[in-house]
């Protein structure tokens, strides 16, 4: 199985689905390049080159450059989805959701419900999120809890290139609007990814490590940090189960509750701000349904309740890192720091 980067996996999923289904179109800023401009007839493929190479294959009728107006092209994508196409719209940074949120949560998310189940909206909104890229506070937020709160939206957080390809293919084939979060600090990370097409079902968590002492539940990029922490802790005799929910809506409650009950100790790792994030939601879920199985309080390892700093030193401190995860597990297991 070949090694591929997160960027390559996303690009490959888009290409394979566009080859499979002529209704799939791609929309976004700088995804097709400036028509009539000198040089190569292809854009860089967005700010980090994720969609580069698709316009020469599928042409400008299916790879559409849009104005710098998220409210316009996200609304256009929602309308296109409601009328028979399967658009993949690139919201360059999730931080820009503020100018197009009405089109997402008040329109696309509600079409199926408001039309009595007779309307479908097969829309995928790909967006970048997360700190660690030195992009400052207006381009680095983790806003997936906001979208998870909205009924009618499906929210996806791939943790590596293999997951990204399979989950994106599933998202494109889904008949509901999907918000697909790609962590910008992971685009160059490589894992084994099959050449052939495959889909990973939504709502099915992945257990990446198995252990008896503590359950670590993590989201997106944090899954990889949780795996590193679990491997380090294993060398000192503390074994951990690591759960990657993959999707926050739908959420695999069964796997989360079962693994929490099996170890009795839980650490939730979430890069989002600590108030009303996924860590608080998961902690409440476990307390409601598995309280009797717990051997200690649920620990939450999150970013602070502050904007993402631009200073590299401060940004590194801001991100929930491996040492913080290890410290939370050791404290919970009573093994000290």
Image (cartoon, rainbow, N blue to C red):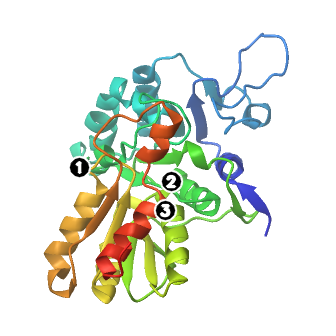
Which residue does the image show at 67% across and 39% down from the upper left?
A: 50
Mark 1 element type: loop
Residue at the farthest front position? 336
Which residue does the image show at 52% across and 31% down from the upper left?
A: 135
Say which quarter of the image contains residue 302.
bottom left
Residue 313: x and y in percent read: 50, 39
- Left or right: residue 176 versus residue 184 is left
Circles 3, 1 touching at the beta carbon (< 8 Å): no
Q: Which residue is the site of mark 2?
A: 171
Looking at the image, which is closer to me, 267 or 88? 267
**Where 45 sits versus 23, above or below?**
above
Q: Which residue is the site of mark 1?
A: 116
Mark 3 element type: helix
CA distance separating discs 3 and 1: 47 Å
Which residue does the image show at 29% across and 49% down from the upper left?
A: 152
Q: Disc 2 vs disc 1: which is toward the camera?
A: 2
CA distance separating discs 3 and 2: 30 Å
Number of other residues with Cα within 10 Å of mark 1, as a class: few under 14, some 14 to 19, many 20 or more? few
Mark 2 element type: helix
Q: Disc 3 vs disc 2: which is toward the camera?
A: 3
Which residue does the image show at 73% across and 14% down from the upper left?
A: 35
Of the image marks 3 and 2, the number of the one nearer the N terminus: 2
Number of other residues with Cα within 10 Å of mark 2, as a class: few under 14, some 14 to 19, many 20 or more? many
Of the 4 image quadrants, the one containing the N terminus is: bottom right
Of the image marks 2 and 1, the number of the one nearer the N terminus: 1
Q: Which residue is the site of mark 3?
A: 322
């Amino acid at each position: 199985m070949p090694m591929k980067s997160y960027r390559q996996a996303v690009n490959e999923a888009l290409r394979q689905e566009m080859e499979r289904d002529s209704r799939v179109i791609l929309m976004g800023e700088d995804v097709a390049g400036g028509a009539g401009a000198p040089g190569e007839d292809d854009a860089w493929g967005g700010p980090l080159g994720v969609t580069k190479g698709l316009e020469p294959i599928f042409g400008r009728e299916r790879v559409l450059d849009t104005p710098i107006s998220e409210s316009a092209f996200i609304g256009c994508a929602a309308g296109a989805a409601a009328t028979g196409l399967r658009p993949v719209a690139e919201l360059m940074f999730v931080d820009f959701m503020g100018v197009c949120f009405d089109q997402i949560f008040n329109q696309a998310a509600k079409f199926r419900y408001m039309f009595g189940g007779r309307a479908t909206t097969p829309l995928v909104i790909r967006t970048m999120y997360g700190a660690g890229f030195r992009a400052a506070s207006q381009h680095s937020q983790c806003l997936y809890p906001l979208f998870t709160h909205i009924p009618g939206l499906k929210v996806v957080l791939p943790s590596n290139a293999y997951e990204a390809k399979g989950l994106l293919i599933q998202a494109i084939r889904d008949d509901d609007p999907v918000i697909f979060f790609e962590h910008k600090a992971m685009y160059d990370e490589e894992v084994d990814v099959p050449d052939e097409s495959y889909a990973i079902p939504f709502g099915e968590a992945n257990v990446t490590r198995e252990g008896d002492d503590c359950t670590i539940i993590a989201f997106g990029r944090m899954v990889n940090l949780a795996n590193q922490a679990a491997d380090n802790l294993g060398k000192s005799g503390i074994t951990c189960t690591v759960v990657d929910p993959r999707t926050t809506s739908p959420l695999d409650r069964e796997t989360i509750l079962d693994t929490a009950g099996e170890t009795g100790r839980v650490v939730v790792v979430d890069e989002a701000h600590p108030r009303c994030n996924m860590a608080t939601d998961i902690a409440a879920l476990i307390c409601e349904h598995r309280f009797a199985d717990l051997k200690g309080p649920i620990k939450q390892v999150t970013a602070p309740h502050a904007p993402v700093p631009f200073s590299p030193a401060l940004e590194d401190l801001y991100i929930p890192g491996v040492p913080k995860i290890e410290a939370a597990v050791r404290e919970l297991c009573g093994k000290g720091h």
